[in-house]
Structure formats: structure tokens, C-alpha cells
Amino acid sequence: MTYKTARAFLDSLINYEKKVLVRNEFKLDNIRRLLEIAGNPQSRIENVILIAGTKGKGSVAYMIEAGLRGCGLQTGLFVSPHVVSVRERIQLNGEMVTKKVFARLIEKFQPLLKRQRVSYFELLTAMAFDFFARTRVDYAVIEVGLGGRLDATNLSEPALSVITRIGYDHIRVLGGTLRKIAREKAGIMRTGKPVVIGSQFNEARQELEIQARKVGAKPFWVDERSRVWDESVAYPGVSFSCWTELGGGRVNLNLLGRHQIENCRTALTALGILAKTDNRIRFEPVAQGLSQVKIPARCQVVRANPILIVDSCHNPESGAALAGVIREYLKDKVVLIYGSLRGKLVKKTVAPLAPYTDTAILVAPNSPRAMSPVVLKGLFRRLGVLAEAAPDLKAALKRAEELSAGRLPIVVAGSFYLAGEVLTLLSRGRVAKRIA
């Protein structure tokens, strides 16, 4: 099977990430049955770290993987959604799987789907489980897709669960209160197993405390188990001194944003718990690994002069984080290219960006769930921001370059789909030279 054929088969499956109608019911019956047919590969993976949350779960996943790899350990990483290539979702030792490996995984599961049909995401999850089991990774770092309790990734058997900050996202599926959302995220906790919990709003924290007691999980609260001082926030990253479960020292991240300190504290706490039973995990090599971590579409700098940043800012917490990056690093108003999917809390997401936006250029991401740029235009204008709609991304980028005049920074934000589109364009050299 060729990679092209494999992609075509995957794309033929129902993909709830792209469906216009939001899925309002989740069940694990189909993916559980497929895994049984495949021999339950998830039960053969050693040391699964399962990560849920609203804000920062992807970054924490990348950080934990980088820290483990820095210690010389073999790592698997499963994340979603992808930004440019679907192969990003399944990684071995920091590299996405090759086209040949990806095609072989599809080829293995294709006949099994004749007995049990599953969705796009469920197949990718099963493929990751199988790949990590067969490659015998030391640790498999797995990011939950949506929620926790009824997510396909929750059929894994985590040695350690991690819950990052909980906020409002996917409320039509997970619930309209932090308590309801936290209850769904808490579904990844396991009896007798540790769960690392990042900084939380009171309502979410209270629910997580209740659920940890019900399940019999062992909670480790990041705020109580780590401290940070001497923070330095300056381009091209952030650095700080810390004391955590893993020990202490100086950490340097080549990532924009003070919010990455919170994510890193969570990652270091998780790594510290793992180190209690694995003496290969030590602070110094972890810190070295963290200094090399790169996370696509999370305040990613793709051009230096004038600066151009791509970010997947799609919920209120992400909006606040991006606003902080603009305030602390760019120190100027920006030309903002923004596109969102419907069903998101767009007004609450973009409101923090309004004071730092010179002009907003609104565009529709390449998705049937895309929000109309005309609707977005009205929203930005009500926030007091000059705004105009663009027919497509190339036109939006061209207009942004005109408005920037080589002076104002350009920020592309809103949706993973939009981030993927712009990174693909830039990598092809159609709009701007990509910065290594």
C-alpha cells in the first residue's frame, strides 16, 4: 500500500473533527471492539502517560516527551490534531513516523475495519497503540483528543495521568460548567495511580478533588509541589529557576509565552513522579531536552523580520496566552489574521487580543465548520478593532504584508486548520521565507 492510498482510506472514514454537525454522543464500543480484534495492543504498552485538559495539554505532552528523550529514553508521542501532516500525530523519538510506516499501519488495520468500522480519530489511536507496543517504547506520551472519559485514548492503561488547566471549550459536548467539564477530564484517573493536576480555577479543582477520592487516584497538585522564581521573558523564549518533584535548577525554553512556564511546571512534576521508580530520569538531562523542544503552531515564529507568528488560538485561555505574548515580546500592535470554526467561544477568545490589534483580517479556515469572515468582522468591530474580510488565506497574507509595511508584526491565529494552511504556504516559499 502506498502512502497516498493509505491517506485516501483514512480520509474515507467519518471524521468528527471536520463534520459540520457536532457529535453529541460518544461511546467506546467500536474502538474497544477493534482493539480486541487487533489483540489489544494498548495493554502491551509500558509506561503510558495520558494527558487531558483544556489549555496546555499538547504543550505538556511535547515537553514530557522531550524531557524523557533528553534522558536517552525511547519515546512514543501521540497528539492531535495535526497541523501540516497527519503523520505528526504518531511520533517515535521526536520524529513523526515515515510515510512507509504510516502506510503499513493502515494496511494492517484496513482488513480489521471490515469487521468493525471506526472513525478517523479512533483508527489513528489504534494505530498509535499498535506502533508503540511493537516498537517497545520506554514511555508512550498520549494526548487525549477531546474530554477524557469517553475519548478513545482512555482505553490505554496509564501509569500516570496528567490534567492541565481546565477551561471552557467543546461545551456542547462536555458541558457548560467547569464542574461538568472537569468531571469528563477526570475520567482518565486510575485507581491507585498518580494523577498530576495543573493550576485550576476553584470550581474545576473542587470537582477534580471529588473525583480523585471517588476513583482512589493519588493526586499531585503542581502548585503545591513546585515553585518558580527569577523568570525571564525575552525573545526568543523564556527561562526560569525552579524546584519541582524532579529537583531544581535553571530551565530555558525556546518557546514564546509566560504561560509555557506553567506548562513546564506540570511536565516537570509529572517527570518527577516517574523518576521515583526510574532513576534514569534526572533533572539535568531533562532540562537539556526541554531546551530543544519545538511545538508547532503554539506561538511559533516562522519569520524574524518583520516577525510573523502562527498560533492555534481557539479558546479563551489560548486568547489570553497569545495576548500575553504580544504584550511581553512584541511590545507593539499587530496585524492579526484570524479564522475560527463555528461553535467556539470566539468573542471571549479574541477580546484579550483587541487592545493589541491594529487591524484584523478575517478569513475562513479550510473546514466545513468554518465561521463566516463576515460574522467575525462584525464581532471584531464591536470590540473596537478595524477589521476586513479576505476571500482566502493567500489574499489575507498579502493584505497583512501591505498593512505591516515591514514594521508591524503579523500574527496568524484561531484554528489548527488555519495554522496548518499558513505553515504549508510558508514552507513552499509562496509567501515568505521560512525561518529555521
Image (tube, rainbow, N blue to C red):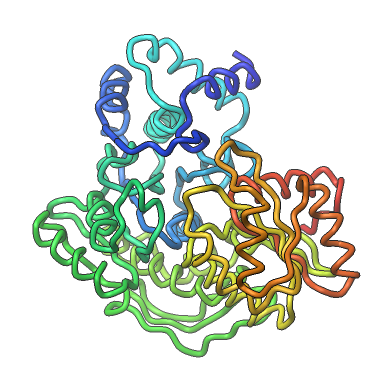
State the image quarter where residue 152 is shown: top left
Residue at 29% over, 56% down: 181
Q: Which residue is drawn at 52% across and 82% down?
A: 240
User: Residue extending furthest bottom?
Assistant: 230
Which is nearer the eye, 202 or 353?
353
> Does the rendering let one see residue 296?
yes
Give the image location of residue 178, x and y in percent: 29, 63
Placement of 210 over or under 43, stated as above or below: below
Would residue 228 be found to the left or right of residue 210 on screen? right
Q: In this view, does 94 lie above or below 310?
A: above
Question: Where's residue 66, x and y in %?
Answer: 50, 57
Q: Establish if 242 lies above or below 7.
A: below
* Residue 31 on image: x %, y %: 31, 27
Quarter of the image with the C terminus in it: bottom right
What residue is at 17 percent from the left and 67 percent from the top?
A: 209
**Of residues 194 and 223, the one drawn nearer to the viewer in this rendering:** 223
Q: Is residue 139 visible?
A: no
